[in-house]
Image (cartoon, helix red, strand yellow):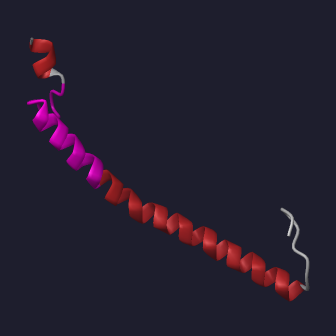
């Protein structure tokens, strides 16, 4: 198939369009579900790095600027 063209009966075209719409919707739901997981990982990584730098999220540059 070429982009924008579905060759076949009306029934076949309808089925293909429906399957593509379902697949696109599934992708969006997965993206939303993964967002929370990514944010939790980023927060954990930030906390670890801030501890390593001996500072806090409230004042991330405190130890650097005080020197």
- Quarter of the image holding residue 20? bottom right
Q: State whether residue 4 is above or below residue 62.
A: below
Query: Which residue is at a point 62% across and 73% down the rendered structure image?
Result: 23
Q: Position of residue 34 (x, y in %)?
A: 40, 61
- Point out residue 9 in the picture as x, y percentages from the top left corner: 91, 86
Residue 40 occupies quadrant: bottom left
User: Taking 48 as reference, is 4 above or below it?
Assistant: below
Picture quadrant of residue 57: top left
Which of these two is toward me, 25 or 66?
A: 66
Q: Is residue 42 magenta?
A: yes
Residue occupying the point 47% across, 67% down: 30
Q: Quadrant of the N terminus?
A: bottom right
Rendered residue at 34%/58% (across/down):
36
Camera-side residue of 9 and 49: 49
Q: Which residues are magenta?
A: 40-60
* Side of 34 where 58 appears, left or right: left
* Residue 32, position as x, y percentages in the image: 44, 62
Question: Main SS type for the magenta part?
Answer: helix
Q: Looking at the figure, which quarter contains the C terminus?
A: top left
């Amino acid at each position: 198939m070429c982009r924008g063209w579905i060759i076949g009966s009306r029934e076949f075209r309808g089925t293909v369009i429906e399957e593509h719409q379902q697949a696109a919707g599934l992708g969006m739901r997965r993206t939303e579900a993964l967002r929370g997981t990514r944010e939790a990982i980023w927060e954990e990584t930030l906390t670890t790095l801030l501890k390593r730098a001996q500072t806090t999220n409230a004042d991330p540059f405190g130890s650097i600027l005080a020197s």
